[in-house]
Image (cartoon, coloured by chain):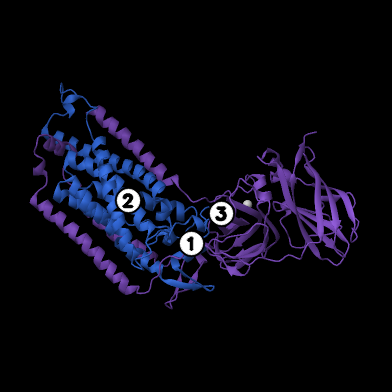
Chain colours: A blue, B purple
């Protein structure tokens, strides 16, 4: 914009306009991230997040952090380097999880009557908060990727365990042993999601005995580091102002 | 400024719409099961369901009913569909209006996927417990990996009562009896509320101050460092350390509260017990088969040889769950769904008993509106225009024999 004429007449008015502007931008950012992130996460994490009988100690632990660190990294890049606001990751994940809760409650439960205790979303918040804190304290993309990305992967399983542990209590059902989560998947009929689509307990991590979740979490953390870099660059590119007239940058 | 404000307002509105659309974007397939839109050859040449029985037509919430019967895994399985090496016995219902309390193939519980052999007959049973009131079309169904859902015949079942009365008690191996319908739900809400509260506190700590314009000015004039105070860093530290402490502590307390947990169970079940049909002593050769489009009738010329020791008659032709009967030989007494039953739909040129050792060429016509209603006539538009089905022969003592037919089909349009 050219500075030929000011739109405000006093400092107080300028402050007020600036604040209004803040809320509008925040609201826009929040809803846009909610929409984009939600679609992204449903397409990549999909069933692993929808159903308790997909939340295993190998693939869910690995996949969910890797595909969900994307938007937090990009939004961080924009909000930190432009505004020094260390809330990019938390804001993204809060938006995503609010969107997911609306979807699970209104569609899965309200529309198709799946009990909420089979289709609640995964908790991604602990990792997001730590990601923001690391960026703020370190003021470095590399540090955030390495420490934050790893922490994001590692915090995922323990951050969800209090929620899913009760559903991993075993039960004997007609002569077979299964967890309550397996039983939920069996009881609450999903016509379009036959059992064989379920990708759980697959993989080659067989030498670690029953302690496979930490190994999966570490692996997930390492890949999250790489994905963090990639999406952080997307975010920086997206937050460029080259395409606006010179005096705006 | 005004223009920007308008633009932002407009953008916010668009973003809100996008977000709402996204939230609505996904609902697990609920209503239409589309049994009629599935390609006819899929229904005619893959899984043949027969001897089906729905134990009830009306059932109250919390009460159970069964669908049982047999299915033949067709030997002439189409090339274009993956073999049923990984299959799952399902039910076609609009979401969890019933819960699947049990399902068995050959007497074995099948909560997992199974491997099926071509040409074999299996006996199955699905136990359903009513959950949501309404009129529901209840189908048998087989999901085949790489082949999709193969939906069997459906029958309308009425569920009465109220869903709020539904309970799903389960006793765990640790000895507690829980109601799986809402088990651990408070725990889910509690932990999500805790983490949302912490996250909102962190967001609020930042967004309560002037944001975009002043901070952008500060960053672009080189005063970025002034935006994060020592106090901010302390608060950040508190949130970071606090998060990790809460995660560690909640994990430890959870392990104490639930010392016995097991991983999710998965795996393919092989070697399913097959059902032995009585050895067939009838041989059938299809000389030709035509489908008359205007007459909604399929006509086949069959050469039948009786190699057994009692005289037999053709009583039923069954394809894609539609049953064409010759009432002189066989009548249905199982309350089979009306729309799938042509009680007098089978006409045979000479259906007098075929004596042992005798061979006869007969004209068989299977005609019923079901050809159109169930879009089986669309068969003539399939990539591999063949038909297939089951023929049932009876002797005077009511002994039944099953013979499958599989042959090319020529449509006639006049
Ligand atoms: Cu139906």
Q: Is residue B328 above or below residue A16?
A: below
Q: Which mark is residue B199?
A: none
- Horizontal and vertical percent position of residue B410: 76, 39
Q: Which mark is residue B94?
A: 3
Frontmost residue, B113 versus A45: B113
Whole-Å distance between the Cαs marked 1 and 2?
Answer: 25 Å
| Callout 3 crowding tier (Cα within 10 Å): few <14, some 14–19, many ≥20 | many
For label 2, the residue is A66
**Screen quadrant of the C terminus of chain A:** top left
Frontmost residue, B137 versus A237: A237
Q: Is residue A204 above or below residue B11?
A: below
Residue occupying image coordinates x 27% and y 42%: A230
Pair 3/1: label in front? 1
Q: Secondary structure at mark 3?
A: loop
Pair 2/3: label in front? 2
Give the farthest residue toward the bottom: B175
Whole-Å distance between the Cαs marked 3 and 1?
Answer: 15 Å
Let me know if residue A54 appears in the view: yes
- Horizontal and vertical percent position of residue B155: 66, 56
């Amino acid at each position: 914009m050219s500075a030929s004429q000011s739109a405000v007449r006093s400092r107080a008015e300028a402050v007020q306009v600036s604040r209004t502007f803040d809320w509008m931008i925040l609201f826009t950012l929040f809803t846009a991230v909610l929409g984009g992130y939600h679609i992204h996460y449903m397409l990549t994490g999909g069933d692993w997040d929808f159903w308790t009988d997909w939340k295993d100690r190998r693939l869910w632990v690995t996949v969910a952090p890797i595909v969900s660190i994307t938007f937090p990294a990009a939004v961080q890049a924009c909000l930190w380097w432009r505004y020094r606001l260390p809330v990019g990751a938390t804001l993204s994940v809060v938006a995503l999880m609010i969107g997911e809760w609306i979807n699970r409650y209104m569609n899965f439960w309200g529309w198709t009557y799946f009990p909420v205790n089979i289709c609640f979303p995964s908790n991604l918040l602990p990792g997001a908060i730590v990601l923001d804190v690391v960026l703020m304290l370190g003021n470095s993309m590399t540090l955030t990727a390495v420490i934050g990305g790893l922490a994001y992967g590692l915090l995922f399983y323990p951050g969800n365990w209090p929620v899913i542990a009760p559903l991993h209590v075993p039960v004997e059902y007609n002569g077979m042993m299964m967890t309550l989560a397996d039983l939920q998947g069996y009881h609450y009929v999903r016509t379009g999601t036959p059992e064989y689509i379920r990708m759980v307990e697959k993989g080659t991590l067989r030498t670690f005995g029953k302690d496979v979740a930490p190994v999966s979490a570490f692996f997930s953390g390492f890949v999250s580091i790489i994905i963090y870099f990639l999406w952080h660059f997307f975010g920086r590119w997206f937050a460029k102002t080259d395409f606006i007239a010179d005096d705006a940058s | 400024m005004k223009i920007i404000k308008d633009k932002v307002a407009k953008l916010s509105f668009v973003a809100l719409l996008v977000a709402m659309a996204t939230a609505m974007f996904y609902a697990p397939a609920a209503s239409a099961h589309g049994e009629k839109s599935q390609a006819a050859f899929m229904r005619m040449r893959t899984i043949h369901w027969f001897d089906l029985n729905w134990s009830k037509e009306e059932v109250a919430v919390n009460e159970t009913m069964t669908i049982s019967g047999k299915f033949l895994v067709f030997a002439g399985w189409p090339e274009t569909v993956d073999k049923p090496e990984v299959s799952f016995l399902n039910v076609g219902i609009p979401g969890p209006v019933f819960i699947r309390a049990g399902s068995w193939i050959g007497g074995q519980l099948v909560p997992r996927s199974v491997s099926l052999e071509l040409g074999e007959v299996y006996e199955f049973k699905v136990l359903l417990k009513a959950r949501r009131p309404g009129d529901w079309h209840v189908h048998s169904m087989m999901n085949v990996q790489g082949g999709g859902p193969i939906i069997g015949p459906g029958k309308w079942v009425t569920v009465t009562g109220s869903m709020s009365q539904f309970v799903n008690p389960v006793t765990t191996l640790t000895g507690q009896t829980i109601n799986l319908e809402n088990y651990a739900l408070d725990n889910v809400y509690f932990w999500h509320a805790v983490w949302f509260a912490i996250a909102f506190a962190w967001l609020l700590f930042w967004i309560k101050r002037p944001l975009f314009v002043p901070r952008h000015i500060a960053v672009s004039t080189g005063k970025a460092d002034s935006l994060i105070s020592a106090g901010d860093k302390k608060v950040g530290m508190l949130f970071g350390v606090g998060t990790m402490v809460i995660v560690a502590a909640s994990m430890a307390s959870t392990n104490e509260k639930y010392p016995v947990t097991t991983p999710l169970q998965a795996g393919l079940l092989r070697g399913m017990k097959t059902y032995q049909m009585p050895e067939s002593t009838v041989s059938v050769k299809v000389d030709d088969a035509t489908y008359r489009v205007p007459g909604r009738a399929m006509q086949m010329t069959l050469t039948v040889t009786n190699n057994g020791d009692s005289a037999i008659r053709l009583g039923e032709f069954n394809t894609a769950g539609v049953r064409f009967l010759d009432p002189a030989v066989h009548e249905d007494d199982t309350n089979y769904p009306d729309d799938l039953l042509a009680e007098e739909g089978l006409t045979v040129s000479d259906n007098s008993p075929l004596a042992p050792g005798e061979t006869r060429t007969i004209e068989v016509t299977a005609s019923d509106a079901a050809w159109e209603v169930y879009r089986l006539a669309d068969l003539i538009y399939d990539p591999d225009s063949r038909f297939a089905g089951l023929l049932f022969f009876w002797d005077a003592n009511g002994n039944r024999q099953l013979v499958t037919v599989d042959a090319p089909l020529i449509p006639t349009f006049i």
